[in-house]
Image (tube, rainbow, N blue to C red):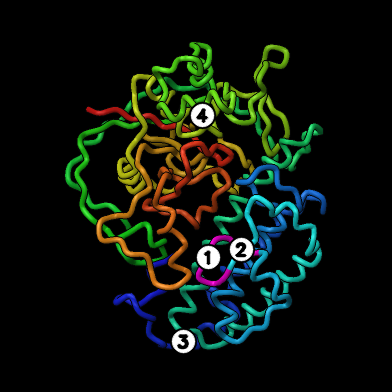
Amino acid sequence: MTTNVMGPDGGRASRTRSRSEARPNHPLRQRYLRVRALTSRLCDGLEPEDFVVQSMPDVSPTKWHLAHTSWFFETFLLKPRGFTSPDPAYAYLFNSYYNGVGEQYPRPQRGMLSRPTVREVQSYRAIIDEAVLATLEADLDARERAIVELGLHHEQQHQELLLTDIKHVLSQNPLHPDFGAPWTEAGTETTPLRFVGHAGGEVEVGHAGTGFHFDNEGPRHRTLLPPFTLGHRLVTVGEYRAFIDDDGYRRPELWLDEGWHWRQRENIVAPLYWDRTDRDGVRHAFTLSGYRRLEASEPVVHVSLYEADAYARWADARLPREHELELALRARPMKGNFVASGALHPRPATGESDVDQLWGDGWEWTQSSYLPYPGYRPPRGAVGEYNGKFMCNQHVLRGGSCVSSRAHLRATYRNFFPASARWQFTCIRLARDL
């Protein structure tokens, strides 16, 4: 949710209108077309049967992502303008968690929705596109323009989820279907990990208030950071294998208590998608390019906060605080491996920066709980449910991943997941106190 949806006093934004929306080349219209087109392109290599599978409760079928992102524009932009839904049942089937606009079909059962069909969902998507584009040719008030912007960032989040979810779906098939992402051998030697210092001090963090941002990125405020150091790159597969070989998964002194019980209960012995046994002496993992040999120089990915924290303890380090990463992100250009590269997998560090891989490749776990900033108040109405109500039992991640859109990210962006989550492209960066 963006703070720009509501006025500065928390009420409705002013009804100031602009005719600029009517121009076919208006930036908001062009951005809408680009974002929606990318979602469709991400599905090009899938068969109809791929669209409907739900491999675990956290995963949603591809078909559901296509419908839900369209439902968002229908519900919050079009219906207040009198739009009639092509099927009233969609309001129930494709509502994710917005209690303020009605009940929702149970999330763990989305894979049971064989109807509407993939073809019907694609038709629904086309209907919504036509209606939104017609709306963008009309007069929009500030609240409506903000809703369109929010809807596009919401869709970019679901593009990431679509890719992480279909990866999990395909990994469960014993045929191990290949999503079709191109593969480039890593081939880069790992540079020894070094730590880059920062003086810390009293710093301003959070979004400054100009341009789009989600409500959980503000208000901007001051915080005190003791001096710290950050690892100059992400932890690699080779380094993580040393942790495994040193019985890292069998040493309870390295683990948070909750993480140790999770590891035992789920029989966790390696990151998600790793083969449990080496193939011909070489470790392999499932990727969106099929099963591939793990290269020692590539970042380790698909680890939980529990695993990341245990590795950090083993390495005589800790996970960063979220604002330590925010300072580092603000100080460096947004260069990295994003979804546009087509790789859809983390790449080895390039050595082009004193602190590498901050942007893209993999979301970086922090030790920071996902909590409201001082003075935070969720916006009014159903769109206020976007972020605020999840500020419990989650941890913050920063930096984006190889399935993130570059235009979707900011240094203040706060992603969040529960500590056990690892089907996302989650990675490890180490930190130490000075």
Judge by depth and name the residue closer to the eye, 85 or 404: 85
* 3D distance between C-alphas at marks 2 and 1: 8 Å
Residue 108 in view in this figure: yes
For residue 416, the mark is none
Judge by depth and name the residue closer to the eye, 225 or 252: 252
Image quadrant occupied by the N terminus: bottom left
For residue 98, the mark is 1
Q: Residues within 10 Å of mark 1 (few under 14, many from 20)?
A: some
- Residue at horizontal 79%, vertical 32%? 174
Verify CB contact (< 8 Å) between mark 2 and mark 1: yes
* 3D distance between C-alphas at marks 4 and 2: 29 Å
Q: Residues within 10 Å of mark 4 (few under 14, many from 20)?
A: some
* 3D distance between C-alphas at marks 1 and 4: 30 Å
Q: Which residue is mark 2?
A: 104
In primary-sequence order, the first of circles 3 and 4 is: 3
Q: Which residue is mark 3?
A: 18
Q: Is residue 98 magenta?
A: yes
- Residue at horizontal 56%, vertical 87%? 138
What is the total number of numbered labels drawn onto the structure image?
Answer: 4
Residue 147, above or below 165: below
Which region shows up in magenta?
94-102
Q: Which residue is mark 4?
A: 262
Tell me residue 193's x, y (percent). Answer: 40, 23
